[in-house]
Image: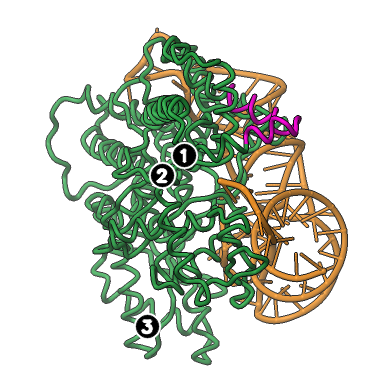
Amino acid sequence: MKTEITDLFLKIIRDKFNVDVNLELLKSDPKYGDFSTNVALKLANVLGKTPEEIANTIILELEKLSQNLLTNITFSAPGFINFKLADEILLNDNYLSKNNFFSNQTIVIETNNPNPFKSMHVGHALNAVIGDTIANLLEFGGGKVHRVSYHGDIGTHVGKSMWSILKYLDGDLDKLNQLKPDDRNNFMSRMYAEGSKAYDESEEIKAEIIELTKKSYKLEDDFYYQVYSICKKWSFEDLDIILEKLGSKPVEKRYLESEAYKIGFKIVNENIGRVFTKSDSAIIFRGEDYHLFTVVFISSTGNGLYAARDLGLIKLKENDFAPDKSYIITDNGQKDYFKVIFKASELLNITTSDETININTGLVKLSTGKMSSREGKVLDINWLVDQVSGKLAEHNENFDNKLIAGAIRYQLLKVKLGGDIVFDIDQSVSLQGNTGPYLMYAHARARSILGKAVQTNSVDEKVKYIDAERGLALKLFDYESILNQAVAELKPNIACNYLYELSQEFNQFYEHNKVLGSERQSIRLKLVNKYADVLRHGLNILGIFAPDKM
RNA sequence: GCACCCGUAGCUCAGUGGAUUAGAGUGUCUGGCUUCGAACCAGAAGGUCGCAGGUUCGAAUCCUGCCGGGUGUACCA
């Protein structure tokens, strides 16, 4: 509906002044009206007229053409046009209409990428939650979305873990089978930390780990292979469990670094002298030619490095889905690196220049200091889940697991995409204020009212909102344009902020205005119903369940 | 060195060209449950929007310089 109003303004401006402008309707201070626009100020220079002159011309036309849907159309200095919306619009608008920023596009997006042989920490969860939510936004925008994941099943981290695990087993595979399923995650994370520490402290062990790392590429040793396979399987089983707990949708396809390695290695070797060059017996891509930097794809020892694998992965996704857009979510530190990879991919004609997109997240930091998985100083996601569970249990013994997901997801999504997240433990498990549970609670309250309401007659068309109702109705009216913005910019926090403000608006209304048994019951029920639907819709896009009770 | 990001209330953050008086949460202080669900609501206190210029009718927001912090920059992933 907001789009229609904007279009009306633009039509008038085109007819009267014969120009096109960017026009936005801004929420204005209630004393001026519901919305305002500064378009007269913008046009003043272009047209060589005073803002007031222009505004008055527009206002005259608006009064003629808006069919009483816009009311209280006024001018205010230095050049704003203010207006209110007729209550009919607020009563009857459909706030849930889809947008189509990505319609008819095939999209591949990596929605998680934790490595096996290491435990999943909050940083991985941030990546996964953002990936999953962006995928939801892309779907809402009409895209044909394929969720995939990518995991490092080869390399030094595997060598480190395998060193500790093999030492622990001491040749006895049964020791693995004796571990309880619940202890596996903890075990794996301990093994990694141990191997990592030993790697740094002893040259001798470092050499052993390098050997074990090489074995992860070949998997020729039978005992090694058995241990490796079991632990890798455990890692992915744990990953599936935790991702489900976080409310993320499953991936369609899981890519492994071992596959990407082969194809990437091949592509690089086939294009030496064209896209890649040899330098000091390494094979590199000269990014400097494109205002980037040089990245080594194959080391001087002939090993296909991370860059070659990323390239291989892009090729694999291309073969499988032939996407129009391909999204990769990484932390900010990899921003420039991926520009190089994408450039190489483009020069190889694997992808087009506007196809690959790297969305950057910030880092998750502990308020007590930087996280480091090498030092074992990480916030394990399972630990965080336990903490949140404990906090929820203080309120209610029978809480739903989806509440945990809602609390954690919202915490990770509410800040600006790309900013670092400082994790204060107390704050991160808080259930009050601007949190997931606040929104979920506000939904449950609304549904509770609706559940108790007896069937009512439809609302009289001529009925008008009173101020208290109108505030909530006006906030609901914003939903469509907020969602448009969140999808267009792929920024979940825009939706978070809005839903929080909306729920605040509802809670205020709820505290001060009786719904059931009120003489205004029918119009208020309609309003509460709209509110609950919008909130549920918005929460679902964030991957958060909207409970009817909690 | 070069490139990119950041600096807003004690703390964690929204706001990135529009409204006399810059907003939330949290923390501190105060009030509200025999009343649709108090994981809530109402109120108080708390800010030279890092600093200095500039552009503009209008700047936390854009430009320039400076200060402070972070990240990246050839064989780790």
Tell me if A424 is positioned left or right of A76 in this view: right
* Classed neighbour count for the residue bearing mark 2: other residues with Cα under 10 Å, few (<14), some (14–19), many (≥20): some
Give me the chain that's green. A
Secondary structure state at the residue bearing disc 2: strand
Q: Assign the C terminus of chain A to one quadrant of the image.
A: top left
Location of residue A66 by image quarter: bottom left
Give how far apart the Cα atoms at labels 3 and 1 are.
Answer: 60 Å
Q: Amino acid at mark 3?
A: Ile
Q: Which residues are magenta?
A: A190-209
Chain identity of mark 2: A
Secondary structure state at the residue bearing disc 3: helix
Q: Which residue is mark 3?
A: A13
Q: Which residue is mark 2?
A: A256
Mark 1 in CB contact with mark 2 (< 8 angstroms): yes
Mark 3 in CB contact with mark 2 (< 8 angstroms): no
3 vs 1, front mark: 1
Q: Which residue is mark 1?
A: A153
Count of marks overlaid on the render? 3
First reached walking from the N terminus: tag 3 or tag 2? 3
Residue in the image at 25% along x and 37% along y: A529
